[in-house]
Amino acid sequence: MKLEIMPKQRALEAEQREEAMEMSGLELWKHEKPRIFLQPPPMPVAVAVGACDEATLVPPLNFAMVDDGIFRSGFPAAANFRFLKSLNLRSIVYLCPEPYPETNTEFLAKNGIKLHQFGIEGHKEPFVSIPDDKIREALKVVLDVRNQPLLIHCKRGKHRTGCVVGCLRKLQKWCLSSVFDEYQRFAAAKARSTDQRFMELFDISSLKHLTPSHC
């Protein structure tokens, strides 16, 4: 004969089994030695940064390619030297009046890079005065393929660099709206109407003979 176990009896047996399991687990926890997980000490910051520098190419602020052999950026720091070396630069077009830092000068000398400096003051509006002659002389250096690959830079890579690149775009027959769009992408909230007005009125006729055939 098959004995039928009542539901209440089954529930009571299940509850007893559960209590037994909990007690056994509790006794095991009481007698078990705590586990200590030792983590390796954090890597010193200097070591971590050095390891990153050796393995990573870090471009300067606002870095971008303008055209074949022509690049633009903000002022390069020592952390950017390895990246600049990978570009195989021949020249740097520097648009600030301040002397080039000794560390940067040593980097140029070590890598055979020629410095072309055109000191343009970085005044804020409404005191902005963009020297037409220096922009024109800078463009002559930029357009000379013997100086390429080259990097154009000022302090932040926004206004002075933006004006030189904008005038180059006019030589490349870009429409003004595209010239301004590119300028504003780099200048962002710091975009200046005086810079855009300068690019609009800049006369490219005296530089057309220097323009490469692909422009």
Image: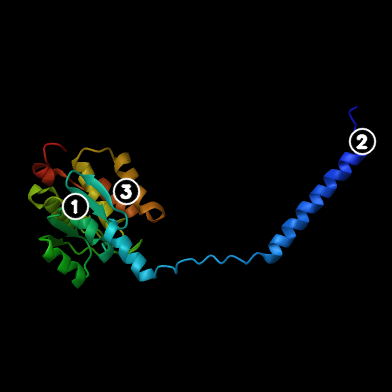
Left or right relative to 8: residue 144: left
Q: Secondary structure at mark 3?
A: helix
Q: Secondary structure at mark 2?
A: loop
Q: Quadrant of the C terminus?
A: top left
Left or right relative to 31: residue 148: left
At which x and y percent is residue 128?
30, 61
Identify the colour scheme used. rainbow
Q: Secondary structure at mark 1?
A: loop
Identify the image quadrant of residue 95: bottom left
- Verify CB contact (< 8 Å) between mark 3 and mark 2: no
At which x and y percent is residue 140?
12, 51
Which residue in the protein does label 1 denote?
87
Of labels 2 and 1, the one closer to you: 2
Q: Which is more toward the observer, 22 or 53?
A: 22
> Residue at 90% of width from left, 36% of height from top?
7
Q: Which one is earlier in the sequence, the residue at label 3 or at label 1? A: 1
At which x and y percent is residue 22?
77, 54
> Residue at 20% of width from left, 64% of height from top?
119
Identify the image quadrant of residue 179: top left
Measured in 3D between alpha carbons, the distance from the residue under mark 2 to the one under mark 1, in whole angstroms, is 85 Å
Q: Which is more toward the observer, 139 or 38?
A: 38
Q: Which one is earlier in the sequence, the residue at label 2 or at label 1? A: 2
Of labels 3 and 1, the one closer to you: 1
Left or right relative to 61: residue 12: right
Measured in 3D between alpha carbons, the distance from the residue under mark 3 to the one under mark 2, in whole angstroms, is 85 Å
> Residue at 26% of width from left, 62% of height from top?
76
Which residue in the protein does label 2 denote?
6
> Residue at 58% of width from left, 65% of height from top?
35
Of labels 3 and 2, the one closer to you: 2
At which x and y percent is residue 196?
31, 49
Labelled disc at residue 183: 3
